[in-house]
Every structure is written in C-alpha cells, then in structure tokens.
Image (tube, grey):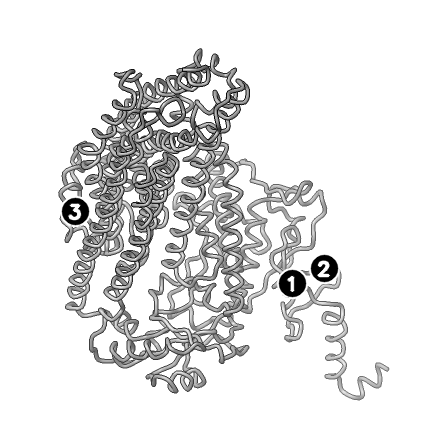
Amino acid sequence: MNDIDSLFQEQQDLEDEIDLKFMLIQIGITLGFIITAISFFSCLRPRFPIIYSPKTALSKTDKRRPMPLGAGWFDWIKPVIKIKDNTLLETIGFDGFVFIYFTRTLRRLVMVITGFSMTVFLPINIIAAYNTDFGHWPPNPGLNFMSISAMNYEYGKKSHLANLHWYWSPTIATCIFTGIVLIEMIRSSETLIQCRNRYIARCQKTPLDPDQELMSRTLLVQCDTLISSQINTKKQQHLIVPHTAMKQCVDSIAPCQHALVGKYNPKLYDLIKEYNHIAQSLEKNLYDYLTQLSQDSHAKRPVVRLNWKLTADAIDHYTEKAVALDALIKRNRMRLQNCHYGWVIYPTRSAAYSAYRSLQKHNSIRVQFVPQPQDIIWSNMNIDPHQRQLKRWFGHGLFSSIVSIWAIPIAALAVCSNLINFIRLFPQSKKKIDDCQLAMGLFQSYFTPCLMVVFHVGLPRIMSYISRQQAYKTETMVERKTLGKLYLFFIVNNMIIFTLVNMMIGIAGQIAALMVLGSSQKYSDYLMQIAKNMTDVSTFWINYVCIRSAGALFDLLQLPSLYALLKKRKLESPPVFCFAKNYSLVLSFFTATLAFSVASPIVLPFGLLYFCLATTTFKYKMTYIYVTKTETGGLTWPLLYRIVILSLLVFQIIMILILSLMEGKDQLYGLIPLPFVTLVVGALYICRLYRKMDIKTWTCASQPIQDEVALLNTVYADPSLSQPLVKPSIPKHLEHLVQQVYRNHAQYDKIIKTLFTPPLPKSTAQKEPQEESEELIIIPTSPSSEQVNVLSSVDHYHEKTEKAIQLYPHEPSTSYHDPNVFYTPIEPSAPILEHIVPPPTYTDVVITPRINQIQTMPQQKRRHSA
C-alpha cells in the first residue's frame, strides 16, 4: 500500500466513523423529537378543539363532519388507525381519499422493497465486501460495507481481487424492484378505478341538486371567431344572457338547447385585489389601535410611511383608499362587455357528452365540461389564445430561471453535506475536523438537512404563483401544474445537481492529492471512486428523511393556527388542504428512497419510518383539520402514475451509471433495455387509465329543468360582479369605538355606511344598485408636508365641507362648486390606479356651466347683459 492508498484509506476511515456515530445520534434525537411532538399534541388537542379538530366544530353540514374524539391524551390514535375506507371517503371526499390511498400505496411499496432488500440483497452486499477485503475483516465501524460501493473497491480504485459476478446482485435487485413498482401501481390503479365507479354509482342513486344537474349537461365553449363587444349598460338582473352568434356557431356542429354568454370587466379583478389588500391593512391597523384605545383614551394613532420622507395617518390613509376603491368598483360593475367564452346547455348528459366529442374535433372551438364554480379562476377566463400562449412561455422561462438560480445554493449545500469533501479539497483541515468531531458531525447531520428544508419553505408558493400566471382556468389545473413543477425542480436540483456536485467535489479532491504527491497512478483508475461518491450521497438523504419524519409530527401541532388563536383571532372555517405541496413532499421522499434502495439499502428503513408516520398524520389531518376546496373525482391519479414512472426511470438511470463506473459491462447491457421496457409498459397503461377515468362514466339520462338561464346565473356568477366587497372585521367588544375613531372625519356617514355596515340582503340590494354607484367621494386637497404627519382626523386635514363634484364631467352637476377648493377623485397622498377618472378641467368646471347658463337665459336678459 503506497502513500496515496494510505491517504485515501485514512480519509475513508474517518468518514465512516463520523457517519456511523452521528447517524446513531440522529436516530436518537429523531425519536426524542417524535415522542415530544406526540406528547405535546396529545396534551394540546383536548384543550383547543377549534385548532385540532375544526371540522367537528365548524363543518356546515353533517355529511362531512367526523366523529368526535374523546378527551383523553391518546384517544385519537385508535380511531385514526382503524377508520374504514367508506367512512374516510364520506368524511374527506374522493380527492382527499385519493391522497391517503396514494400515500398508503407508496408505504406498501417501500415496505415490500425493504423486506426484499434486508433479507436478500443486504446480506449479499456484506458477503461481497467480506470477499473483497477479507484481510481487513471485520471492517472499521461504518456503513460502507453494507452498500454496493464496497464490492471490488480498494483504496479508491478497483481491487486486484475483483469478482465482477457480484454485480449481478444489484442488477437483479433493480429488475425486481422495477417489476414490484409497476405491478403494484397497476394493481392500485385498478382498485382505485373500481372504488371510483362505486362512488359514482352511489352518488347517482341520490337525486342531484338542480345546480349539479344543470352543470352535468353544460359545456364551456370558447369560439375564436366571436369577438367580444363593448356594451355600456346598467346592471341587469341576469348577467348571463343568450347569444345568437355563439348558438349558431355551435348548432352548425352539435345543436344545443341554449348558448349563453356572460359579462365581465377586465379592470375589476385588479381593483378588487387592491381593495382586499387595503381592507386587510385597515383591519390590522384598526384592531391594534382600538385595542390600545380601549385601555388608554389617549392612545397614539398608527402611521404609514408613504415614501422615504412623508408619513400619514394609517387609519385615514387606508380608509380613504378603501372608500375610493369601493366607489370605483361599483362604477366599473356598470360598464361590462361580453365574455370570450360561453355556456352551452344540452337537454341530457348523454347529448352533452356526444356534443363534447364532436366539438373537440374543430380547432376553432375549445370545449370542456364546466368546472365547479368555486374551482374557476375568473381573472384567467377571458384571456385570448395568443396572450395565453405568451403567458405559458413566460411561465416556462421563469421556472427555468428559478431552477438555474436555485442550483447555486444547492451546489453549495452539496459541498457542505459531506465532511470528507473538505478533507479532500483542503487536506490541512483534517486536524481541525479530528479535534471538533462532535461539532462537525452535528453540522453534517443537522445543519445541512435543515438548510435544505429552509430552501424549500417558500418554493410551493413560488411555483403556484408561476402556474397561476400561466392563465390556467381552474384551481385544480393550477395545482396539477404546480405539482409537476415542484417534482421537476426536485429532480433537477435535489437529485441531479446535488449528486453531481457531491461526486465531482470528491473526485477533484482526490485528483488534487494525486498531483500533490506526484503519483504515477492513472486518473482513469479512480473511476470507481466516482461510483462510491454517488452512493455516499445516501447518507445526506438519511439525515434529511429523519428530520422530515419528526417534522411530519410537528405539523400536527398547527403552530400558526395556535398562535392566531392565542392572539384572539377567530377561526371561521377549517383550513384548505394544499394537494400540490403535500403530493410533492411524499413523492420526493419516495424518489430518494427508491433511487438509493439498491446502491445503499440502509436508506430503506428510514424511508419506511417516514411513510408510516406520514400515513397516520395525514389521515388525522384530512379527517379532522383540513377540507378540500373542490372535488375532481380523482382525476389527479394519472398524473401521480406518470410521476411514479418517472421516479422509476431516475432509479434505473442511477443504477446504470453506477454499474458503468464500476466496470460491470455484462450487467450494464442487461439494465440498458429496462428504461425502455418501463416506458412502454407505463405508456400503454396510462392510455388505459385515461379511458377508464373518462367523463363517460358520469353520463346518464335525466330530465331538463326549468328556468335554466336564471339558475346558471346563480351558479356561475362572476364574484367580481356579484360578490359583496369585504369589510374590515372588528371584534364585537371594540365595535363601539369605531365611531370615536372617525368622529372628526368629513365623510363620517359615508365611511360608516361603506366599510362598517353589513351588506343588505340580495333582494334589497338589487333595488338601488344605480344609487350606490353614483354616490360621490369627498377627497381633500393635497396636504402639505406639515399636515401629512398629523396623527388624527383633525379639521385642518379634512376640510369641513359637503361640496363635491361629479366624477364624470359630462353628467349634469347639481351641487355648487367653490372656486377656492380643488377636488380630485383620488386621495393625493396615496394614489390608486390609472383607471380612476382624472379630475375635471377648467373647461368642465367653469366654461361649460356658464355656457349652459347663458343658453337658458331669456333673450331680453341676455341682450341686457351684453
């Protein structure tokens, strides 16, 4: 053994010692965290049922209300574990059941693979390591002898006693695990389809509500040949009206019963979004100030910084913006135009299905069955095809940019994830690491995995935002695209970039050592070290899975909701479950576990621990805490099947690379056809899966209902046109102080009526829409820098005058205008949007009224005036 061999062996012994020592510490700390989380949850659950069982207390219907749990510490465990699938299906809905079913499927896969690996292939790995290095047996404490990297490995290169027949073990294991995953996924898919058909049949036995029945035979159609026309009209009772041109277009292909087109205003979505943000800011500032005011009558009013120099009273600032936006929204609700899409109604579901097939064949018409009303993203409905295509490409470019930028911290994390990389790059650091093994081991075991968790905290929101900006029409489609982006991000950065950087850093350090020592060894002799570096990445994933296993239980504590409750903020409804985030989480762990299941089998028990904990915790959260926003009938399953097939391909490619670097040529040729076989089997079954989950399974004959136009207006009313604007929520014990806050404000009555009066019933509100839209806003002149820093609604900030002007100069004005006061429809210290009508000119205010006055004067009086 020369100097190079002894150096590599010394580095490897140090790495094995640190890995084993701190893996045992990791397991102990993880078990401690798990026990602590279960204890805290069992203690808090009976005390705060509104947080840990909100569906029991806040469910609006008994159909989805779960059975109440006992008050004992551990009374929640047995009902969650023993709950039947039928009960689970009725409680959480079919989409929620699909999530639990998919998690159980992955758990079953990991369990079977772990059993095979621990009983068959792990002993073969140990025997192969013994035969390779029988002169140094038993090996030094570590995990290296349990992985395939110990086969024929000696001092960074192939052993002189290499036996290539040992490589048939990982080759056969790869083929067996591939077959297990394919068979289990096909079997699970068939079982799910049967369950779905039973669920649909049971739902169809009960009579549908009128709105559900109408939706089942209605199509959403968009015709490129129809151009929306601008109409300035007063608010109508029905915003969705028949459209002759669209009916003629559809009738030429598949005659329909009705063709209806809605109305919209593209400005409303941005205005309402800004209004909601302003109302939320106002609510927060009001709540803080009223709380202080209830304790101290001289409480200081909050301020908001408008720019680097000016500040203003926060309550007045947000109040005036909210009032101005309220009036602007009401005006824009009176200025509507035809939508780019329409609803086409057929007499029966079977007729609607036949028309759906016929309309799909025409490129000028895009058709789909109507989604659930709460699933629609209304702001994306009226985007034209060209703009939609540009948004899609922009989203793809933005996603690619984020993946590229995120690769930089991931690469840095890969360098820090293995201490041996520091020693290889900086040999002088070995003494420091020897002296601080405890600190360095904790750094490797906890800091880098926790940093990986932190890197992914905001990632689901970023991907959801990108998908939403790509003009998809429904929330479920956005969630599916978000899931695809999250998983692709995981594959590119966490699997490819992370593994490649880890491998390359290790081999670069070893090449540098060869150059420093002036060795005559060829660099190609150390290709086997690259394969070992690839398998060593599994140590990081073991640490990562341990931390996330404890995190799965800490998620049960619902710390954000508990904090909000302690702040006396009332929970009005159960939170909505985020499918994209949680699907990507379980899929990423399954991919990492499967990818290293053969190369480093020790990762399998840790993956099994995570899936056992995740299945139980997700079942509790879906049953008692979270609700699903919409129901799709399990249409996410084909996407999940495709992702599992992709993870199988990643696993096979990793094994092919490892065997090629270990020079197992015969075994390599045996594995190369495996990805192609997987693709063929996956593609054939995915076609069958789509046919089995086709919309045709929902069709059946039914009788048409009456007054379909009115019902469609009720079901598919655009919230931007019909939904009342949100109002700041004030606790009841502080409501009496609101009048004290605005008592000196010039628009006191307007503010109280607009922002703090509950909306009228719909029947009453429809009687006076025009009056509300024509109400005026009194906005003061721009204050000076001294005036803008006042902390209350004093008289010199808001002029005590009731004079106002019309927002539209061409309309006759009945109010007197003071020439010394200038009015503007927006608050000067905080301008809103460009949509607001500009202030009247001198001609509008002075010249035009004088001309009108002269024209109405008697002829003799005019002559006398001249």
Which residue, given by chain and number where applicable, does mark 2 sit on? Answer: 821
Q: Is residue 644 visible?
A: no
Locate residue 713 relative to residue 390 in the image: left or right: left
Going 32% across and 84% down the picture, which residue do you hit? 257
Secondary structure beneath disc 3? loop
Going 41% across and 73% down the picture, which residue do you hit? 366
Secondary structure beneath disc 2? loop
Q: For label 1, count other residues whose C-alpha is less than 10 Å away and answer few (under 14), some (14-19) or many (20+).
A: some
Q: What residue type is labelled 3?
A: Met
Q: For label 2, count other residues whose C-alpha is less than 10 Å away and answer few (under 14), some (14-19) or many (20+).
A: few
Labels 2 & 1 near each other (Cβ < 8 A): yes
Residue placed most toward the observer, 656 or 310: 656
| Residue 415 position within the rendered picture, expressed as x and y whole percent measured from the top left | 48, 29
Which part of the image, by quadrant, shows the N terminus? top left
Q: Which of marks 3 and 1 is in front?
A: 3
Which residue, given by chain and number where applicable, does mark 3 sit on? Answer: 67
Q: How far apart are marks 2 and 3 (CA)?
A: 66 Å
- Res 367 quadrant in image: bottom left
Residue placed most toward the observer, 861 or 251: 251
Locate residue 294 relative to residue 185 in the image: left or right: right
Q: Which amino acid does label 2 sit on?
A: Val
Residue placed furthest toward the bottom:
859
Which residue, given by chain and number where applicable, does mark 1 sit on? Answer: 803
Going 27% across and 27% down the picture, which residue do you hit? 146
| Residue 268 position within the rendered picture, expressed as x and y whole percent measured from the top left | 52, 64
